[in-house]
Amino acid sequence: MQHYFFRSHLLDIFHNSICLLKLPFLAAIFSSKANDARSLFFAFVIASFLTSCQEQKPILQPPLVSVGIQKVERQTLPAVFEYIGVVQSSHEVEMRARVTGYLETIGYIEGSFVQKDDLLFQLDPRPFQATLAQANAQLAKEQAVFWEAQRAVKRFTPLYEQNAASQRDLDNAIASEMAAQAQIMAAQARVAEAEINLGYTTIRSPISGLTSQAKYRVGSLISPGQDSLTTVSVMNPIWVLFNVSEQDLLRSIKDIGKERIFFPKNDEFEIELILADKTVYPEKGTVNFNSPSYSQKTGTMTIRAVLPNPTDVLRPGQFVRVKIYGAKWIDAIAIPQSAVQQGQKGPFVFVVNANHQAEARLIKPGSWIRNDWIIWEGLEPGDLVIVNGVNRVLPGSFVKIMIGDENSDKKLQEQQMGTRT
């Protein structure tokens, strides 16, 4: 468009210069001695230009570019942060064997919901029952020895008083009684241990939750050193973990210091989840944990949210989009992302100046709000930013407002019509 205007203006200058020569220059050509065919042709061309001197062409105006604008204004806007999160059970228990034995029974339906104390696995109890019986027999034997030791003490005590038994005999009887009593305590401990090990052959759920697949089949030899037998997970409430980068956290700290953003009291943010099918999860959540340190591997900080999950829609391992509500941008300027262009000197936008021309303005963008971009530097309230038709605009282009702020459109269009008529 600018090349067209320049070429038209150059032709006008050339035409006016020819007109200034007028007839004296033409007469000089005819009076020349070299009045040949070439001179006559050149005179004819000059005469053709002179005949058009009486009718000057109007100056061509470049066409107006139709654009849409947005009037800049400061406002308080919701600051919404979005991250990728993963769902995790709020209470997950790995079921492991505590004794070695052969798996005799799987007492639950894999993947089903179980209640607390429901049977999950049963190991063969017979070896442990035999061990318990042996421990009880040993306890009975030790109790008999203790009874005999007590009787010996009772016999030697009156004999010692009558000088019929020595002090040593009485001391040996008392020591035997005490040793027998200690043996009873040891036998009782072995009985308790045998009872505990026998109880470990029956594996019950410690919580109410959803079970996973059993990793071993009936007949397998199970030992404490092996992997977990299954997992029981609490589904309601549910946790969602997401990571916030160090850069985002530092930017938020700076914005708080500059009073650009306001966080809710006690960081009581509201959590909303977007599922894989782009539907919004109906239950809202809150943040209940912030990691005290950054991960050295990823440079991020883990944050945990808790949400109700009454219908078990959310399952552990599920990926979701996490939206965090509650913060607010203070005195912020927001424009559509489509209005922002990238140049050699950085991002810029086109604004309509007082001459109704497009003017490139360098800006400093901040965060995003849906389809808008927060602008911290480069724009002032009242500026008219071109948001539609940006790809048709060049610096200095005359524009015609078609869409955008109606009051600004009407006022600017009236000014344009008055200026260009």
Image (cartoon, helix red, strand yellow):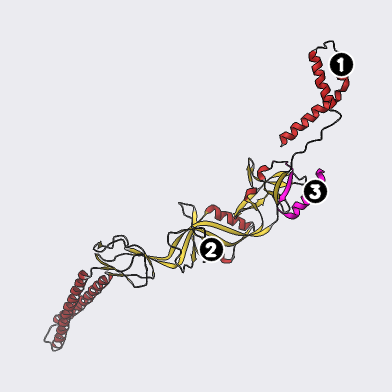
Q: Does the rendering let one see residue 171?
A: no
Question: Residue 393: which quarter of the image?
Answer: top right
Q: Which residues are magenta?
A: 394-421
Residue 172, given in percent of the width and then of the height, sits at 15, 79
Contact (CB < 8 A) between labels 2 and 1? no
Contact (CB < 8 A) between labels 2 and 3? no
Q: Secondary structure at mark 1?
A: helix
Cα–Cα span, label 2 and label 3: 49 Å
Q: Is residue 51 above or below residue 364?
A: above
Query: In terms of sequence position, does the residue under pointer 2 or pointer 1 come before the other?
Result: 1
User: Relative to residue 332, is residue 207 drawn left or right?
Assistant: left
> Residue tagged by mark 3?
415
Question: Residue 134: which quarter of the image?
Answer: bottom left
Viewer-closest of 87 and 159: 87
Query: Closer to the camera: disc 2 or disc 3?
Result: 3
User: Relative to residue 296, is residue 43 drawn left or right?
Assistant: right
Query: In terms of sequence position, does the residue under pointer 2 or pointer 3 come before the other?
Result: 2
Q: Residues within 10 Å of mark 3 (few under 14, many from 20)?
A: some
> Residue tagged by mark 1?
28
Query: In terms of sequence position, does the residue under pointer 1 or pointer 3 come before the other?
Result: 1
Q: Amino acid at mark 3?
A: Gln
Q: Amino acid at mark 1?
A: Ala
Cα–Cα span, label 1 and label 3: 52 Å
